[in-house]
Image: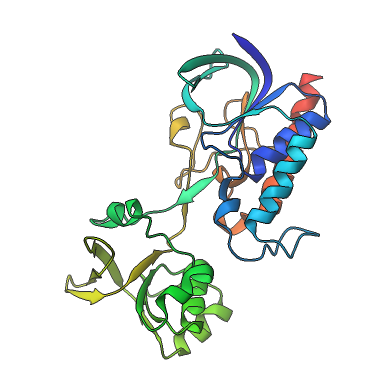
Amino acid sequence: MKKVDIVILGGGPAGIAAAIWCKRLGINHLLLEEREELGGQLKQIKNIVMDYPGLNNMVGKDLERQFLTHLDELNCHYDTRITLGDINADSQTLTYLKDDSTNLIHYQFLIVATGASPRRLGIPGESEMLQRNEIYSASVDAYRFEGKHVAVVGGGDRALEGALLLSDHGVNVTLIHRSERFRARMELMEPALQRENITVLTNHRVKEIMGVDRVSSIRIEDEQGGSNNVDVSAVLVRIGVQPNSDFLKHIVELDAEGHIVTDSFGVSSRSSICAIGDVCTKPFYSSISTSTGQAMTLVKHLSTYLH
């Protein structure tokens, strides 16, 4: 059994920053990532990163490259393409599978930085759409749909931003929201409501996504149960995110949305298990800066126990 002071789960900005601070403070650490590459959600950021001081002219992949270069220059310890096994909070051990080999690790502290994933509608046709890789960025892929019809689902900033970006490129947008109240900022709401090529449907839900080789239409339903089909070339689901915390739901305390509940340092209801980044942060406060700052605070806090 291998013994490590701090094991970090998740290779996004929070996890990478935690590994960097572990290295800087001389803490024996290991970062574990299920994907083939580190970077987390940075790969999905197609717009210019606006909230990271000093690096406001980079898209996500450029910032990801900077993060990974820093990580490798410091010779931080990490392993990718792993499959997480059991976590035993009582014995402070975990197992993971790598290349058909099972590894058992004893940790002093476990830092969970597994982030969040896009929330899904959970309706017929959605999984088929995702399997066909019909996942689009409004800023990058808008040109594909010029003169066509696209549905955007959601009522927050991302949904409204997506609708406006598509509209700017001559796309006919139907914005579908389950309520009359929007969570989006007013500076996004006002232009969206005024655009001639954006149709806003409130108190409606998408009940089915249809199409064999590609999306061709959706079935929507109003509050009274009346439904009709709308022809669309794509569906952009922008209904928020959900924390990647299910594997801990019987181990640490989670809130109603699934975020890991922590104190101001990032320590959970189990003193040996901590959390940073989107897995414990409400979406309104989520950012790259938040994640890296939480990593610094937590690792410095844990170092006082390890040293």
> Residue placed farthest to the top in the image?
1
Judged left or right of residue 227, residue 164 is right
> Can you tell which quarter of the image residue 285 is in?
bottom right
Q: Residue at x 46, y 43 (%)?
A: 258
Q: Is residue 103 left or right of residue 17?
A: left
Residue 38 at x, y percent in the picture: 61, 40
Does 61 appear above or below 106? Answer: below
Vertical placement of residue 89 versus 76, above or below = above
**Residue 63 seen by the camera:** yes
* Residue 307 horizontal/vertical position (percent): 82, 19
Q: Where does the N terminus fall, quadrant-wise?
A: top right
Q: How is the image coloured?
A: rainbow
Residue 192, percent across and down? 48, 83
**Residue 131 shown left or right of residue 276 in the figure:** left
Tell which of 162 and 262 is nearer to you: 162
Query: x%, y% of residue 299?
Result: 74, 33
Residue occupying image coordinates x 57% and y 30%:
269
Residue plotted at (58% across, 26% down): 270
Q: Nearer the viewer, residue 89 or 130?
A: 130
- Depicted 40 relative to depicted 24: above or below: below
Labels in figure, total = 0
Residue occupying the point 54% across, 56% down: 44
Say which of 302 and 136 sits in front: 136
Would you say residue 183 is visible in this rendering? no
Front in this rendered view, residue 17 or 243: 17
